Image: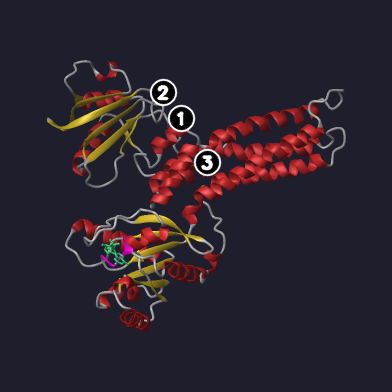
Amino acid sequence: MFDVLDDTIVAVSSPPGQGFRGIVRISGPRAVGIAGGLFADADATPLSQRGGFRRFCGEVRIEGDASVPAELYLFRAPRSYTRQDLVEFHTIGSPPVLAMLLERIIEGGARAAEAGEFTARAFFNGAMSLNEAEAVAALIGAQSDAQLRSAHRLREQAPARQVQAWMRQLTELCALVEADIDFAEEPIEFITPANLRDRLTALRAELDKLIHDAKGSERFETLPTVLLIGPANAGKSSLMNALSQTDRAICSAVAGTTRDILTAPMSLPSMDCLLLDGVGLTHTDDELIQLAQSLTKTAVSRVDLLCLVVDVSVEHRNKDLEILRDHRRQRAVIAANKCDLMDVDKCAARVAQLRRAKLGPVQTTSAASGAGLEKLKSAIQDRLCEDQQHGQEHTILPGARLQSAITAASAALGRAGRQACGMGETIDRAELIALELREALDALSVICGVVTTEDLLARVFADFCIGK
Ligand code: GDP
């Protein structure tokens, strides 16, 4: 996989489909030559003689004499994403235009890139660690803003730097212990057992702390998910804000304000979950809202629980419950919202009507006054916990590679520590300790891209899309 790194690759790297701006990215030794042949601007200096880190405005030829306006971004090796010469054309986001431009560049001698190939080059050319490459994949794949935050954190925190520091310490320890083996006959002491024990303990504590912190930061992605659905204006966005105590959703009296799926963490009595707010599913001719509705409909079958929000202050409409009838296999709770707008008896009658539909527990709420919110949270937790899986701590983490590598290293250090504990004045089990230290080093080096396996790389880069 990706065994050729020195040819020139090209791909459309803006999202697929019609967009405001389309980006075509070329990387490799011929990138500047090929781009220069297609690009024209007011400057007579050939592109090959211009400096990097610059942007030029002009036109790019896409077919015969036909050109379209384009900006050209020039990055010179090694100061580029891939550490190779890299050119980006930013032009009209029309798929046919981008396809024609791609064709011209391929005619010029570039090859169509495979998914993840740009980032793979960045990795192989030393511009980023495997961990950072994985973070890029996570960014591309992020489906909720909680996931996006987590991916950003992964990229920004770059635990790889921390891991490199540990590897330096481990290498030194390993060298000292191995020196003890090599010079066993000599009266030289490279490291005392006490010093070795102390350093092993301190190092292991740092590793364990990172595992603990990572669990906290990536927790969101494995939280059970609850999707608020229901007719427009029932109060989903207001409930989202009230339940999560954030201002994630913009609430308005205009039906169909929420056009995207918003997410926010929510604390339940004894666990956390992720609350999702989709668009109202009321029929509309607005294409944008229809698109958002299809997003919500897809989410309906993927989440752990549906929370149907109905406005109890208006006459009960049968079609409000349709979505739950269509997804009977999905667990659900019903929030009879806006109870503050009506008297208690009338409200109770409407709630009884909702209960008769037998689609899930019904709880009266008011996003405006806060009434019933804690009870709704309890009902959500109870429903989620019916599924055993969510009653427990979620331990499957997306940064699983990082987690498992550090956990393996920590375990190896633990074993080395136990060997060291039994020692007296001299290091008498040096071979066994050295073996464990090497194992810890091997585990950590996987994160920094020093030692890595084909399998592992294939898995990381397989998640990419073309152009990244
Ligand atoms: P969505 O379309 O379902 O997301 O509904 P919104 O949350 O945007 O709410 C629609 C309108 O109803 C807004 O004007 C809210 O202020 C109002 N609203 C929402 N919940 C309540 C509630 O519990 N009581 C009252 N009185 N008004 C509410």
**Residue at 66% across / 43% down in the picture?**
410
Q: Which amino acid type is shown beneath numbered disc 3?
A: Glu
**Residue at mark 3: C-beta within 8 A of ligand 1:** no
Query: What is the number of the mark on residue 127?
Result: 1
Looking at the image, is 468 positioned above or below residue 127? below
Magenta region includes residue 325: no
**SS type, badge 3:** helix
Nearer the camera: disc 1 or disc 3? 1
Callout 2 crowding tier (Cα within 10 Å): few <14, some 14–19, many ≥20: few
- Which mark is first along the chain, 2 or 3? 2
Q: Which amino acid type is shown beneath numbered disc 1?
A: Ala
What are the residue bounds of the magenta stretch? 233-237
Report the Cα–Cα distance between label 3 and label 2. 25 Å
Report the Cα–Cα distance between label 1 and label 3. 19 Å
Whether residue 450 appears in this view of the structure is no
Dot 3 corresponds to which residue? 454
Q: Are marks 1 and 2 in contact (CB under 8 Å)?
A: yes
Left or right: 444, with 195 as reference point: left
Left or right: 39, with 464 as reference point: left
Q: Which amino acid type is shown beneath numbered disc 2?
A: Pro
Between 462 and 353, the residue placed more toward the observer is 353
Q: Residue 307: horizontal and vertical position, in percent?
A: 38, 68
Prevailing secondary structure of the magenta residues: loop
Whether residue 220 appears in this view of the structure is yes
Q: Quadrant of ligand 1?
A: bottom left
**Residue at 66% across / 31% down in the picture?**
169
- Which mark is first along the chain, 2 or 1? 2
